[in-house]
């Protein structure tokens, strides 16, 4: 029997300071994961910061509209890398053509700016796997991995990296093994009709480790 507040229970038990990898295959899982996190953040009065890489937020917004869900993201702070479709309150733009060291420095400055007026926030990262297509070797690859690793343990955020596994695996270097290593929680999500199956491959919470939990679409939409 699915508890009425199963999704909220999961998000409550994920601690501030955690980095959560949400893995999925091509589906509408990213759209409904973003929607669930938005609703949760608003109920908890937590600011929302979205890393929008290569216009993924525009794709998610448009697909949600096709489902009859109209979100303007006007209350969301956005750090935008590449792309040209502006959604939400864009506070910083970073060029995709920057050298990795320059990109990382600019991203850190943007993140510092985004978090400076918040005690705690929900951070959603979209399209990260696509950035690895611009990596030209192991040195650049590990510069990005190490910079991400530095954010683990930051008590001002709960971070959710939503990754398309198929896209990640085709990158010059598949980032999934290293991403799974450096994050605190890994959730593999599979769409099943009007529900989603969450498999906790790795979790900082003993209660979730190795568990499979099902969340209904109704729970996300209400």
Image (cartoon, grey):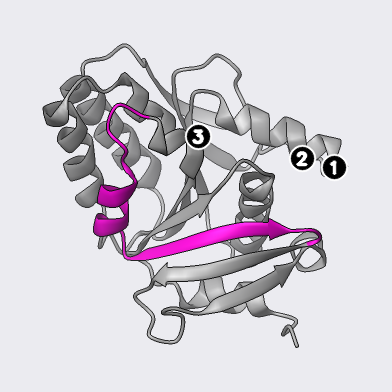
Q: Earlier in the sequence, mark 1 or mark 3?
A: 1
Residue 9 x/y as whole percent: 58, 79
Residue 45 x/y as whole percent: 59, 62
The CA span between labels 1 and 2 is: 5 Å
Q: In which quarter of the image is residue 221?
A: bottom right
The CA span between labels 2 and 3 is: 18 Å
From this view, report whether residue 209 is shown above or below residue 177.
Answer: below
From this view, report whether residue 207 is shown above or below residue 185.
Answer: below
Question: At x 20% / y 29%, what residue is drawn?
Answer: 105
Q: Residue 78 carries which label?
A: 3
Q: Quadrant of the N terminus?
A: bottom right
For mark 1, does the 10 Å Cα neighbourhood hold few (<14), some (14 to 19), or many (20 or more) residues? few
Secondary structure category for the residue under label 2 = helix
Secondary structure category for the residue under label 3 = strand
Q: In which quarter of the image is the C terminus?
A: bottom right
Residue at the spot of label 1: 67
Q: Nearer the viewer, mark 2 or mark 3?
A: 2
Q: Which of marks 2 and 3 is nearer the N terminus?
A: 2
Q: Nearer the viewer, residue 98 or 28?
A: 28
Secondary structure category for the residue under label 1 = loop
For mark 3, does the 10 Å Cα neighbourhood hold few (<14), some (14 to 19), or many (20 or more) residues? many
From this view, report whether residue 13 is shown above or below residue 97.
Answer: below
Residue 7 x/y as whole percent: 64, 72
């Amino acid at each position: 029997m699915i508890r009425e507040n199963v999704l909220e229970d999961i998000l409550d038990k994920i601690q501030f300071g955690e980095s959560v990898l949400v893995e999925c295959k091509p589906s509408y899982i990213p759209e409904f994961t973003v929607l669930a996190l938005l609703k949760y953040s608003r109920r908890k009065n937590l600011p929302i910061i979205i890393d929008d890489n290569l216009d993924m937020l525009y794709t998610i917004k448009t697909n949600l509209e096709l489902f009859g869900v109209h979100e303007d993201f006007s209350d969301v702070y956005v750090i935008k890398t590449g792309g040209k479709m502006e959604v939400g309150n864009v506070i910083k733009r970073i060029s995709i053509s920057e050298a990795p060291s320059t990109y990382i420095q600019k991203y850190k400055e943007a993140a510092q700016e985004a978090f400076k007026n918040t005690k705690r926030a929900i951070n959603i990262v979209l399209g990260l796997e696509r950035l690895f297509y611009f990596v030209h070797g192991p040195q650049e690859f590990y510069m990005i991995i190490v910079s991400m690793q530095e954010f683990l343990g930051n008590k001002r955020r709960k971070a959710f990296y939503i990754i398309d596994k198929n896209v990640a695996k085709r990158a010059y270097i598949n980032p999934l093994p290293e991403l799974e290593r450096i994050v605190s929680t890994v959730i593999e999500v599979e769409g099943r009709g009007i529900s989603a199956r969450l498999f906790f491959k790795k979790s900082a919470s003993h209660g979730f480790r190795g568990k499979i939990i099902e969340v209904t679409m109704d729970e996300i939409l209400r």
